[in-house]
Amino acid sequence: MVEDAPQKKKILVVDDEPVVVEYFRAILESAGYEVDVAHEGREAFRKTNRQCYDLVHIDIRMPNWDGLDCITSMQHVNPEIKVFVVSGVLTDDVLRELEEQPIVKGWIEKPVNPENYLRAIRTAIESE
């Protein structure tokens, strides 16, 4: 794996598939991150309004609010939050929408290589 994360950063992992959530939780925790989870956009939005996260890792396709709806809502409430998208549906239209959101600090398509994923997460957390 990649070197440990400095100063125990907190990441919210948002995905509707429990096995995917646990996969990313394991990768992040093994790298020294503290991980919280949400299983859909509304739950993630509520959590980001109650707690501070260094980064929100979010999927695009989820029930209720999808990732794009959640990102737009988070942007209005907390323009300082940082979001990293991990999805299997990064179409040209989705990418255009992500590029318009200043809180989106990067994205990666599923399936992911754990080392590339951790490198991208670290870059997103350190971004301005």
Image (spheres, grey):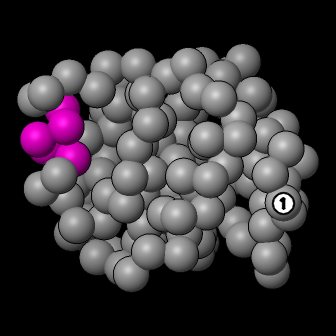
Residue at x 34%, y 38% (from the top left corner): 67
Query: What range is drawn magenta here?
Result: 94-98
Name the dominant secondary structure of the magenta segment.
helix
Rendering coords of residue 9 (x, y %)? 72, 71
The correct choice, above or below, for 75 with respect to 27 in the image is: below
Quarter of the image with the C terminus in it:
bottom left
- Figure quadrant of residue 63: top left
Query: Who is closer to the viewer here, 36 or 4?
Result: 4
Image-based side of 113 in relation to 126, left or right? right
Q: Note whether 18 is above or below 103 in the view shown.
A: above
Q: In this view, does 1 lie to the left or right of 39?
A: right
Position of residue 110 in the picture relative to residue 114 (left or right): left
* Residue sitting nearer the eye, 19 or 117: 117
Q: Tag 1's secondary structure? A: loop
Residue 18 magenta: no
Identify the residue at image location x=37%, y=61%.
Answer: 105
Q: Which kind of residue does numbered mark 1 sit on? A: Glu
* Above or below, 7 relative to 71: below
Q: Residue 53 location, x and y as percent?
A: 59, 69
Res. 43 in view: no
Res. 3 image quadrant = bottom right
Q: Position of residue 77 (x, y in %)?
A: 28, 72
Left or right: residue 46 compared with residue 97? right
Which quadrant, please, contains the N terminus? Answer: top right
Residue beneath label 1, please?
3
- Location of residue 116 in the rendering, given as x and y in whole percent from the top left corner: 61, 41
Vertical arrangement, residue 12 with respect to residue 13, above or below = below
Residue at (44%, 74%) from the top-left corner? 127
Residue at 30% x, 65% y is 103
42, 30: nearer the viewer: 30
